Amino acid sequence: MKKYKRDAAAVQSDILRRPYQRIFPVFLLPMVAAFSIGFIWPFLQGLFLSFTKFKTTSKWTWVGLENYAKAFADKSFRYSFGYTALYAIVSLVLINLLAFFIAYALTQKMRGSNLFRTVFFMPNLIGGIVLGYIWSMIFDGLLSAYGQSILTNTTWGFWGLIILMCWQQIGYMMIIYIAGLQAVPEDMLEAARIDGANGWQTLFKVTIPNVMPSITICTFLTLTNGFKLFDQNLALTGGQPYIINPDGSSVHTTEMLALNIYNTFYMQNSSARGVAQAKAVLFFILVAGIGLLQLKATRSKEEAA
């Protein structure tokens, strides 16, 4: 009798599911079409144009790997890669450390924690261009007293970008860490206290292993955002200052990869657009590869925990 009831319930469930299965492609098709038009087709077109010399997308000449050779030979592109990698590593460490400890403090049942969460999150709602110009005025106002400017000093430009991104992204990462910390089982924390573990032991042996999913998300977002940074770089320093190489070429010492590609495409002559497109393809491969490697590394630690 029980088996008959289970079979009847399964049949009824299957009957109810069939209409949704029939109309599911109707809802899926617009999303697939939008993704194809907005991402897949532009990406494939950009990939093709990276092997051509063009002024407009309809007027091109096939040049093969010449654009990629020019991209690798470009000193400013190689410099921007090293500068961006250094920036991404420093911002990754600082943003995640500060966001985690702020989140940890705000989950300790302190008064006004909701207000602090709102205040820390608010900078994330401001656009990167606006933030760049705001912080540019702040830094120049402070540095002018010492006869300095963020546009004339590479070191100040680097740390200016770090401070700006920390101020903007810490609040967002903090929210993710708070969600992870609140999901830590209370009985595990209570068991650690009963066993005599102090605060630091509980943090490293119980709390951090349980928030590894949040750490994975935050490190991925911070790392990829560091490599993709564009609008803040454009508004804060614009890549300035610059140095002149012996061969006459110039290198902007605070120019990151995305800004370097932008300047190659729009600021140089139109014959360099194919080179800029090749740089963009290399940039995509770099960011995707680093992101996947980071996810694999943190996922392995997540599984071990």
Image (cartoon, rainbow, N blue to C red):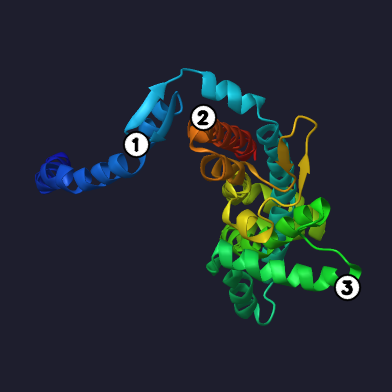
Q: Position of residue 263 (x, y in %)?
A: 58, 44
> Is residue 80 in view from this perspective?
yes
Q: Residue furthest top?
A: 64
| Three-letter code, disc 1 | Ile
Residue at 46% x, 19% y is 63
The reply to whether callout 1 and callout 3 are in contact (CB within 8 Å) is no
Foreground pick, 229 / 173:
229
Name the one closer to the observer, 4 or 102: 102
Q: Secondary structure at mark 1?
A: helix
The kind of residue on which mark 3 rests is Ala
- Nearer the observer: mark 1 or 3; the answer is 3
Separation of marks 1 and 3 at Cα, in angstroms: 51 Å
Residue 301: numbered disc: none
Q: Amino acid at mark 2?
A: Ala
Which mark identifies residue 40?
A: 1
Q: Residue at x 62, y 60 (%)?
A: 235
Disc 1 to disc 2, how far (Cα)? 17 Å
- Dot 2 crowding, Cα within 10 Å, few <14, some 14–19, many 20+: many
Residue located at (80% from left, 56% from top) = 152
**Residue that badge 2 annotates:** 278
Left or right, 127 with respect to 96, comes to: left
Q: Which mark is residue 145?
A: 3
Whichever of labels 2 and 3 marks the residue nearer the N terminus, that label is 3
In the image, residue 203 sits, relative to residue 15, either above or below, namely below
State how far apart marks 2 and 3 are (Cα): 43 Å
Q: Position of residue 249 (x, y in %)?
A: 71, 35
Q: Nearer the viewer, mark 1 or mark 2?
A: 2
Q: Determine whether label 1 and label 2 are within 8 Å by CB.
A: no
Sequence-wise, which precedes: disc 1 or disc 3?
1
